[in-house]
Image (cartoon, rainbow, N blue to C red):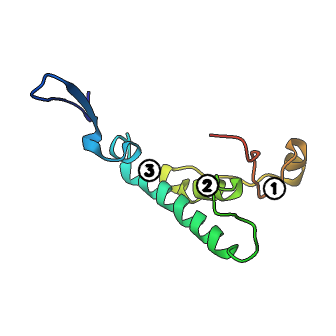
Amino acid sequence: KDQVDMIQFPDGKRMLLLSQGRLLNLGNATGHPSFVMSASFTNQTLAQIELWQNRDNGKYERKVYTLPKHLDEKVAKLHLEKIGVKLTKLRPDQAAYIGVKTEGPYKPDHYRY
């Protein structure tokens, strides 16, 4: 398979090396790796901005967090044009029907894409 190499050591033991030892999500990305990297870097940048802007207000402790859903959706929105997608805005009646704000976020924080 692509990006899968078997290495055999002199003692006969074998090891599968994936993606030449690089990060799997970047080294084995299919389609457009630069697009995957752009989404990943945008995600990290927005997370750093969020942490910096809230550094003194006690919103975040020193632990691992999942990116807030509104920022996760912002990352997606910033990349829609590249994949040829045009996002329309919800009308107030549509947003009320599904119980969200017109500007989002559109999924609860625990939802995973």
Tags 1 and 2 touching, CB below 8 Å = no
Question: Which amino acid type corresponds to the residue marked 3 in the rendered image?
Answer: Val
Could you tell which of marks 2 and 3 lies nearer the N-terminus?
3
In this rendered view, identify the residue nearer to me: 91 or 100.
Answer: 100
Mark nearer the N terminus (1 vs 2): 2
Q: Residue furthest top?
A: 12
The quarter of the rendered structure image containing the C terminus is top right
The residue singled out by tag 3 in the image is: 36
Going by the numbered disc 2, the residue's amino acid type is Val
Residue 93 % position (x, y): 90, 49
The secondary structure type at the circle numbered 1 is loop
Rate crowding at label 3 as few (under 14), some (14 to 19) or many (20 or more) other CA atoms within 10 Å: some
Check disc 1 and report the residue beneath it: 102
Q: Residues within 10 Å of mark 2 (few under 14, many from 20)?
A: few
In the image, farthest residue toward the front: 11
Q: CA distance from mark 1 to mark 2?
A: 29 Å
Where does residue 77 sit, x and y in percent of width and height?
61, 56
Q: Is residue 100 above or below residue 53?
A: above
In this rendering, the label closer to the viewer, 2 or 3: 2
In percent of width and height, residue 40 lies at 48, 55
Residue underneath mark 2 = 64
Position of the N terminus, as image quadrant, is: top left
* Callout 3: SS: helix
